[in-house]
Image (tube, helix red, strand yellow):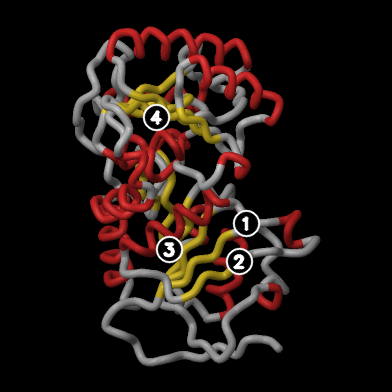
Amino acid sequence: MRATLRFMDRPSSPRIWTLTDERAGNFHQADALAAAMGGAAHHVRLRFPAPWRWTSPRGVPGALARLPLPEEAGWPDIAIGCGRQSALALRALKRGANGSVFTVQILDPRIDPAEFDVVITPAHDALRGGNVLSTIGALNAVNAAWLHTARQSMPLIAQLDRPLTSVMIGGPHRDAPLDPDSIAALAEKLRALRRREGGSILLCGSRRTPAPWQPQLRALGQSLDARVWIDARDGANPYRAALACSDRIVVTADSVNMLSEACAVGVSVVSFALAPPQGKLGLFDAALRQRQLLSDWSDPAAPRPGLNETAETAQRVLQLWRDSGRG
């Protein structure tokens, strides 16, 4: 049964939907922004079939009928998407609502930003437009409440010897190469750190960490007497607790999302790469260093200013929604 959407009386706070594909990074950014704006009333999980999946964000005709919209719901006041498929979904939703839905696209939609009410992109994407809001990094949910909950979720992480250094491993990227030689170099850095400071090391893989690297990473963890999490075989993922409990966080330079989250915590953050990142990742690295958000290996683990852009961006979006006359 197709959803029947109708216009409803305007609430005192906006009714927000998020629309993303199955990529965790896209969902987390949209959800974080919605939470900072009061919370999403509904999430639309996008699974466009061909040809819409191929032509996103173009090919609007017929796309609305392919959205799993909630039954008997009113149109949202604000719809937030992240990623290429969401850009198509937002355009279809706005057309179906005769322009009444305020659309917020996170990440470069690869089409004219004027197709949306607001587009939010990292500055290193170099997207310009009167309705474009630029951030340094990726939007995320890291704030004081998030960190408190994360610390409570795995108390054993908080009890590890100090200083606690958490190491977040991404994967290969053309602008910040990461390979087994890089892992070997990282191992030497961590051994020197351990000799100098003592403390504990927690090593975390990610979805992007290639499976063939697992034996090397596990051997590295064993040589450092570190706790290691690579996949579900190692138990519950400690990533959030590691961020919340760490005195220092080391992140491979290939991951904008993980670096953005690490820099939001307010501790020393080291971006690791064998050579300086290039391209967009190089611009991102330069922006973090300009704001003094990154530390060197020789710096002691210590509190630092946090990169907390999500709350500020949420308030700017809410104001733009009100100024549009739809709030």
Mark 3 or 4, which is nearer the eye? 4
Residue 39 x %, y %: 36, 69
Going by the image, does 290 lie left or right of 201? left
Q: Is residue 96 above or below residue 85?
A: below
Give the left or right position of residue 275, taking residue 174 as reference: left
User: At 31% from the left edge and 65% from the top edge, which residue is drawn?
Assistant: 37
From mark 1 to mark 2, how far is it between C-alphas? 7 Å
Residue at the spot of label 3: 117
Q: Residue at position x 20%, y 30% from top?
A: 304
- Label 4: how many Cα within 10 Å (few below 14, some 14–19, many 20+): many
Which residue is at a point 49% across and 66% down the rendered structure image?
18
- Dot 1 corresponds to which residue? 22
Q: Of circles 1 and 3, which is in front? A: 1
Q: Amino acid at mark 1?
A: Glu
- Element type at mark 4: strand
The reply, left or right, for residue 22 in relation to residue 265 is right
| Figure quadrant of residue 316 | bottom left
The residue indicated by pointer 2 is 45
Q: Earlier in the sequence, mark 1 or mark 3?
A: 1
Q: Pick whichever of labels 4 and 1 is earlier in the sequence.
A: 1
Look at the numbered discs 1 and 2 and tell me whether their residues touch, using CB distance below 8 Å.
Answer: yes
At numbered mark 2, what does the secondary structure look like: helix, strand or loop?
Answer: strand
Could you tell me if residue 261 is visible in this image? no
State yes or no: discs 1 and 3 in contact (Cβ < 8 Å). no
Q: Which residue is mark 4?
A: 166
Please report contact status of discs 3 and 2: CB closer than 8 Å, yes or no.
Answer: no
Gap in angstroms between the C-alphas marked 2 and 4: 32 Å
First in sequence: mark 2 or mark 4? Answer: 2
